[in-house]
């Protein structure tokens, strides 16, 4: 069930009404209703995937209890690695088995060795990377004595399967979400209105920005051999706004939807395209994943402590793993490596935490140096996105080679170029709104709140009209494939 579908537009109000009609706002009934709704939401994709989700939930639930109840360190490790091994085993089989088999076949064929491997013809279970990481963080935190295991199976299951975050995050922590799940929730009008406002902005990002940029990005990337370097640059920029509007739009809808039920999810984006260096970009892009890798991989490896070689090693590992997490394709690994190289200077010279506050805080415009830094960071990000979007590494290399040819200095031309001018204007409007609201949790959080009522509703209705004007065929969210 897509957030931008008619099905969800019916599903959400029904669940919302039933939820708040629970007698005396009973937390147990609320959680049962949300869990049943979440499982229905998930089986709507493919009922077979639901059994894998439930199995993963049961595995981590019982493993957590066993780790907590035993005083034997050896037994604790057995339960820990049993849970980690099975979870990563499922993830590896469904997501990476064919990738490794195909890679091995290609290597052996180069050595004149013929291999006829057996490959899996299965669909990747939607959201498996996200709910697997929910479970892994829960088990590791119990093993490290950071939290106690949750004994209520309904509450734990809801922590894993809560439908706003189930298929594409944010990747929640038990320390943040479980306490909210366990307590009785009362309807908060201000919180609900704020949730609706964030849903509206998320739908605008997805339907008006991401889906429209996707049309031109797909046209240019899928026929890149026919276009000049200048046109290919436009294609990469369109994709950059497509993936940002798509994924941050999903996150906004997820967070806004959770607020309708009195639950606050972790923030996942903080205006990353206004970053002044790549380290800041990765503090602002897919925050829940970046912090997950920081806490459960980077810091255990030693983090930024130790000598220069250890810093380089740890940075390379975390970005390569991040690239591999995104998919079974060498393009994602190269994308991760590029980002590691872009971040490396700030890690080595200790400048990776220079820009912790949002740019131009308390000011209307950035300084010249800040503008230059934002532009450079954005260009590096767009360059890396080419590998993320390309079909394979050769495609990406050919794409970039044409960009750095003489055709870069030509006038861009592609089918529908005249229609794209309207999209460029809308993107500029979008950037302007994001810039004005950059000091908030999302762009519309405070925008219009203190305006004249007519002006405020004119602005909101304008966004709604744009959403309806550009809505058409339902488009999947990019991160569903991860």
Image (spheres, rainbow, N blue to C red):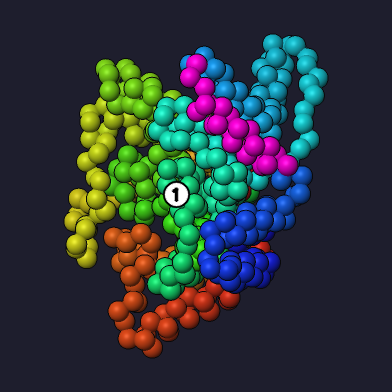
288 shown above or below 44:
above
* Residue that badge 1 annotates: 179
Please state the horizontal and vertical placement of residue 96, each as a whole percent of the image: 65, 30
Left or right: residue 276 compared with residue 464? left
70 shown above or below 19:
above
Residue at x 57%, y 23% (from the top left corner): 79
Please state the horizontal and vertical placement of residue 13, each as a whole percent of the image: 61, 71
Q: Is residue 326 visible?
A: no
Q: Is residue 60 magenta?
A: yes
Number of numbered discs on residues: 1
Q: Is residue 193 magenta?
A: no
Location of residue 454 (image quadrant):
bottom left
Residue at x 57%, y 44% (from the top left corner): 152
Q: Residue furthest bottom?
A: 454
Q: Which residues are magenta?
A: 51-72
Closest to the observer: 81 or 214?
81
């Amino acid at each position: 069930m897509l957030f931008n579908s008619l099905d969800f537009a019916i599903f959400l109000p029904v669940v919302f009404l039933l939820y708040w009609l629970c007698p005396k706002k009973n937390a147990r009934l609320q959680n049962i209703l949300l869990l049943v709704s979440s499982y229905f939401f998930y089986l709507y994709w493919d009922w077979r995937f639901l059994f894998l989700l439930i199995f993963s939930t049961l595995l981590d639930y019982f493993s957590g209890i066993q780790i907590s109840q035993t005083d034997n360190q050896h037994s604790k490790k057995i339960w820990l690695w049993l849970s980690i091994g099975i979870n990563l085993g499922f993830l590896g089989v469904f997501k990476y088995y064919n990738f490794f088999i195909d890679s091995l076949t290609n290597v052996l064929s180069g050595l004149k060795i013929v291999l006829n491997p057996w490959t899996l013809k299965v669909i990747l279970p939607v959201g498996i990377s996200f709910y697997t990481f929910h479970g892994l963080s829960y088990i590791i935190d119990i093993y490290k004595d950071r939290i106690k295991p949750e004994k209520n199976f309904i509450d734990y299951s809801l922590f894993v399967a809560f439908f706003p975050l189930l298929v594409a995050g944010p990747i929640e922590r038990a320390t943040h979400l479980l306490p909210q799940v366990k307590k009785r929730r009362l309807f908060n009008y201000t919180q609900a209105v704020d949730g609706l406002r964030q849903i509206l902005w998320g739908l605008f990002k997805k339907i008006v920005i991401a889906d429209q940029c996707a049309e031109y990005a797909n046209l240019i990337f899928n026929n890149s051999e026919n276009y000049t370097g200048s046109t290919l640059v436009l294609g990469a920029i369109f994709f950059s706004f497509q993936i940002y509007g798509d994924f941050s739009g999903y996150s906004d809808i997820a967070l806004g939807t959770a607020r309708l039920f009195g639950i606050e999810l972790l923030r996942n984006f903080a205006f990353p395209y206004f970053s002044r260096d790549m380290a800041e970009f990765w503090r602002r892009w897919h925050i829940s994943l970046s912090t997950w890798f920081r806490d459960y991989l980077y810091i255990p490896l030693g983090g930024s402590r130790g000598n220069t070689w250890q810093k380089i090693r740890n940075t390379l590992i975390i970005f390569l793993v991040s690239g591999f997490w995104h998919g079974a394709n060498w393009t994602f690994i190269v994308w991760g490596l590029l980002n590691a190289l872009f971040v490396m200077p700030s890690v080595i010279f200790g400048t990776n935490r220079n820009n912790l506050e949002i740019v131009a805080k308390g000011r209307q415009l950035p300084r010249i140096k800040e503008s230059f830094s934002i532009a450079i960071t954005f260009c590096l990000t767009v360059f890396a996105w080419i590998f993320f979007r390309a079909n394979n590494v050769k495609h990406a290399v050919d794409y970039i080679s044409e960009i750095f040819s003489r055709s870069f200095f030509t006038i861009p031309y592609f089918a529908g170029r005249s229609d794209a001018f309207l999209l460029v204007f809308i993107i500029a409007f979008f950037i302007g709104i994001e810039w004005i609201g950059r000091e908030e949790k999302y762009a519309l959080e405070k925008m219009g709140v203190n305006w004249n009522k007519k002006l405020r509703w004119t602005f909101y209705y304008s966004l709604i009209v744009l959403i309806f004007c550009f809505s058409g065929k339902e488009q999947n969210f990019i991160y569903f494939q991860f």
